[in-house]
Image (cartoon, coloured by chain):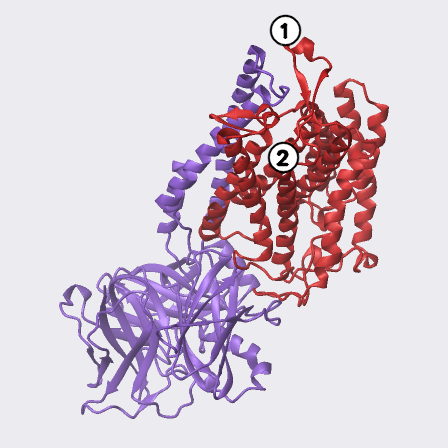
Amino acid sequence: MGKKSITLPSEKIEGLSETFPGRRVEASFGPRSVPWHLWCGIGAVFSGAFGLYWDVSWHMSIGRDSFWTPAHVAMQMCGVVAGLTCGYLILSHTFGRRPAPEARDASVRIWGFRGPLGAFICTWGSLAMLTGAPFDNWWHAAYGLDVKLKSPPHSLLIGGTFIIGLGVLVMVGAAMNRASGELKQKLTWLSLLVGGLMIAIILLISLEYKFRPMMHSALFYRTVSVVVPIVLITVSQPTGRRWACSIVIAVYTGLLLADVWIFPLFPAEPKLGPVFHKIDHFVPYEFPLLLIAPAAVLDLLSIKIRGWDKRLQAAVFGSAFFLTFLLVQWPFATFLMSPGARNRVFGAGYMGYSTHPDSYYARHLFLQLEQTGAHFWIRMLEALTGAILSSGLGLIGADLMRRIRR
Amino acid sequence: MRKLTQVVLLLILARPAAAHVGSPDIFFEGNAGPYRLFVTVRTPRVIPGVAGIEIRSQSAIREIRVAPLLLTGLGSENSPAPQVAERSADDPQFFACSVWLMQFGVFQLRIHAYGAQGEGQLVVPVPATVQGTLRMQNTLAFALTALMIFLSIGAVSVVGAFFRDGMLEPGADRRPVDLRRGRLAMLAAAISVVGILYLGNRWWNWDAEVTTSRIYRAPRLAANLESGEYMLLRATDPEWLQLVGRHPLIPDHGYLMHLFLVRFPEMDRFWHLHPRQIKPGVFLQGLPSMPSGLYKIFADVVHEDGFPETLLAEITLPGMQGSPLTGDDSEASARPVSRVSQISGVSELPDGGRVLWERDAAPLKPNVPGHFRFRVEGRDGKPVQDLEPYMGMAGHAEFLSWDGTVFAHVHPAGSVSMAALQIAEASLMPDMANLQPSPHRNHSLSAAALPPEVSFPYGFPRPGQYRIFVQMKRAGRIQTAVFDAQVK
């Protein structure tokens, strides 16, 4: 696939002579173009993320359906494509007769197998999805309870999708760290793309704490503040791009906006009862969260506080994320509950066929999940702390991503 | 994991019950316009769950479609897209499909039949309750355990590789410090994996407990003898009393409660009584003359949302002289089950007549739906011409296992509650106005004389010995025939 090794004998990597005393290590830039397996991996993650939201829409519009719905197929394609691609990579690196030298050199070894580190992570994610499928099937037969997303087998399935995203991110990140010039720029964009898809996936895992009626509860802000900064910072910081966080969130926002604006164009009819709302088109999941605002603030801050102590950076990033998100999402949630948002742009008027007319959701009311004011503020404090810890972990993740080479 | 397995085993041993006791499947026969259909609904063990629908038509039908709606309230008006039932390759008059029941409560299955005589519609009320959980098959448990171990070890190994090799420049060799870092990372990963598995197991157990708490169990009644001649029945479950507050009981073919008293273990005395409710959840019944003994009580009620229940109780009574039976109350005596040596297809009636169970020689099998046909003959051996409706129907049959764990009160229309059926049919009226006339509402009969044969659609839920009480009204007197059945 056009792999070409460019060895620059004179170009020593900075600091490596100290790291590897007595050894001469040369920079190997590998292929000039994005390798095919990275495209496959990114396609798999996109298929998984899009499939997950499509499946949510399918359940809201048609209900539980056969295993072979297009949405299910899209989700499963994530595991299949990633698993086959990475399985091939591992086998070819291990047993291939003519593995490219730079490819073999840029691999890790696990249980006697060789391959890119990300390929092993992706394979693990695929196997997790494979395990999750029969487990989920049995779970439904044993306990029912399909009406909720949060269950051990669902976590394994969606978690597997997320881990595949992480594996692809590691593969892209390692290639990015080894590359230079135009290829590095391309890979930088691709890592931000994968990061945006991972944000979409991780926000779906916590979907049950993020429905619109919960947007004035502290639980909602705690959930978002814990799950988003770690991924956002891990992905964006190593790229060194000016608006990296904003680009990542733009990907997430674009994916959900596409859902909100495109899905209703297609006809759908519920197959299950009870039908509380007659619908004749697909009902999308909700308008994306306004994460673009805290992302932009993080981008602006990252220049200002570069070089600060990591703990201080985490405190600043976390606080900024939490406060900015609170400041924009709270009033935006109020707007989403108003009649002005019940249109095709904001999609607040869409109701799944099984949404009970007496529910908070159908009545466009906020649900008070915290019984007392004290409970609310304790959770808000937890949200702030969670955002800081999540940012700190994100900084550690970003440091690891910068150092990943294989 | 062992604890979880024990929980699951306990769950599957829990007695399933809904409208009846231990007999969750629904058998129904009725007319979809010009087409006579026998419908069997295999209710799911869990909710949401899949109900299996089996439909047999007596005449040629081109297509059958099935749609689930709630029986009452919101959700009873809009129909989802009906599912097309698949025609059997071996039997062109047999159709089957699956329908999801997505929530607790009472559904109505609207069955649309299409054929040469046009379209017909039939409605079947179906209560949806959790009956238990499933045990994981050994092969699946083994496969999942193996995969989980593989994933756990794999996760630790991948994390180790990340910190050992992942940050090395391509081609660089590992140094001792890399190996040490890798080992430390693997240790941390192993601890994390154990923690995740522990938390996952707790989560699993918690979800299993949630399901356990939702398993339907027949409500209990406390039965006491009052003033030596009255039986006071009091609901003891506070949740059930709350339910009665939300959904009061409604009459089912004329009465709020149909109470069956059966002397155990011999099942030699049987009463079908109708207590009156003196306040929600409290019933009073004047007792007739009865011999002493332990009596099991099966009390059928229906809530206003169409949810049928069988309440359970036991009472030990002394021999007593009570009031004569009046109205629709009835009684029967039978040979003690311990003295039944041969299953007979004939039951002698007190008036000298007899009832014949018309069945072939084939052994009775569990979970096989069929008609239980009984012909009434007079003292002269000829089919009688003087049968009358008994509480609006040609007959009532109670199927009771000898051990008392299965009880079903069945009518010629089937095992559904008549009150729930009336609600369902009422909701169908606007649709039926456009369809061909249907004798749908023939479950409640006029006082005209009935044919000498009565038939009940039903299927035994499991192997065992059963006693069947068949009740009809003849010339103003209620007659109860008693049969025994061996189901293998």
Badge 2 marks a residue whose secondary structure is helix
Residue at position x 62%, y 44% from top?
A: A44
Disc 2: host chain: A
Quarter that holds the C terminus of chain A? top right
Colour in which chain B is drawn: purple
Q: CA distance from mark 1 to mark 2?
A: 35 Å
Q: Can residue B385 be spotted in the picture? A: yes
Picture quadrant of residue B449 = bottom left
Residue A155 position in % (x across, y down) = 56, 42
Residue at position x 72%, y 60% from top?
A: A350
Q: Is residue B183 above or below residue A267?
A: above
Q: Which residue is mark 2?
A: A166
Q: Is tag 1's residue or tag 2's residue first in the polypeptide sequence?
A: 1
Residue A370 position in % (x across, y down) = 69, 42
Badge 1 marks a residue whose secondary structure is loop
Q: Which residue is mark 1?
A: A22
Residue type, numbered disc 1 = Gly
Quarter that holds the N terminus of chain A? top right
Disc 1: host chain: A
Residue type, numbered disc 2 = Leu
Q: Is residue B418 above or below residue A7?
A: below
Colour in which chain A is drawn: red
Nearer-the-camera pick, B286 or A273 = A273
